[in-house]
Image (cartoon, grey):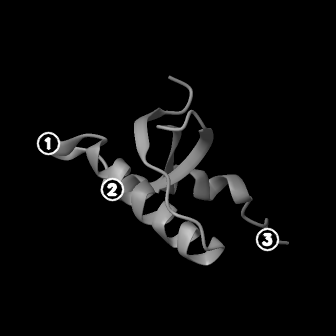
Amino acid sequence: MAKNKSKRSNDSEFTLFDVVYEDGAIRSNRRVPTSALGGLDGDEPAKAIIEAQDRDIAAQSGQPPRVIKTIKRSGK
């Protein structure tokens, strides 16, 4: 019988970030595709991706998007 792939196998496709917003709110483990990171820009593309995610969430909730103060990889 074949073994089912675990959900954990997909975790390598994403890098997790902790986000601190200007209003003091903190959100942990925000997922960013690993393929978008690295190269000369390092983790800088993660901020743009998380901002886009926040805009989508804000549009759905009817609230203004939060302004990101800092981001860092989770666990560092």
Residue contact between numbered discs 3 and 2, judged by CB atoms under 8 Å: no
Image-based side of 4 in relation to 14, left or right:
right
Q: Residue at x 36, y 49 (%)?
A: 47
- Which of the two discs, 1 and 2, labels the residue nearer the N terminus? 1
Q: Which residue is mark 2?
A: 48
- Which of the two discs, 3 and 2, labels the residue nearer the N terminus? 3
Type of amino acid under label 2: Ala
The residue most toward the right is 1
Residue 2, numbered label: 3
Type of amino acid under label 3: Ala
Residue contact between numbered discs 1 and 2, judged by CB atoms under 8 Å: no
Q: Nearer the viewer, residue 3 or 14?
A: 14
Viewer-nearest of discs 3 and 1: 1
Q: Nearer the viewer, residue 51 or 3?
A: 51
Q: Which residue is mark 1?
A: 40
How far apart marks 1 and 2 lie (CA) works out to 15 Å
Residue 61 lies, with reference to residue 11, above or below; the image says below
Residue 27, numbered label: none
How far apart marks 3 and 1 lie (CA) works out to 41 Å
- Label 1 SS: helix
Type of amino acid under label 1: Leu
- Label 2 SS: helix
Q: Which quarter shows the N terminus?
A: bottom right
In the image, residue 8 lies at what x, y percent?
68, 52
Q: Residue at x 52, y 63 (%)?
A: 64
Residue 71 lies, with reference to residue 1, above or below; the image says above
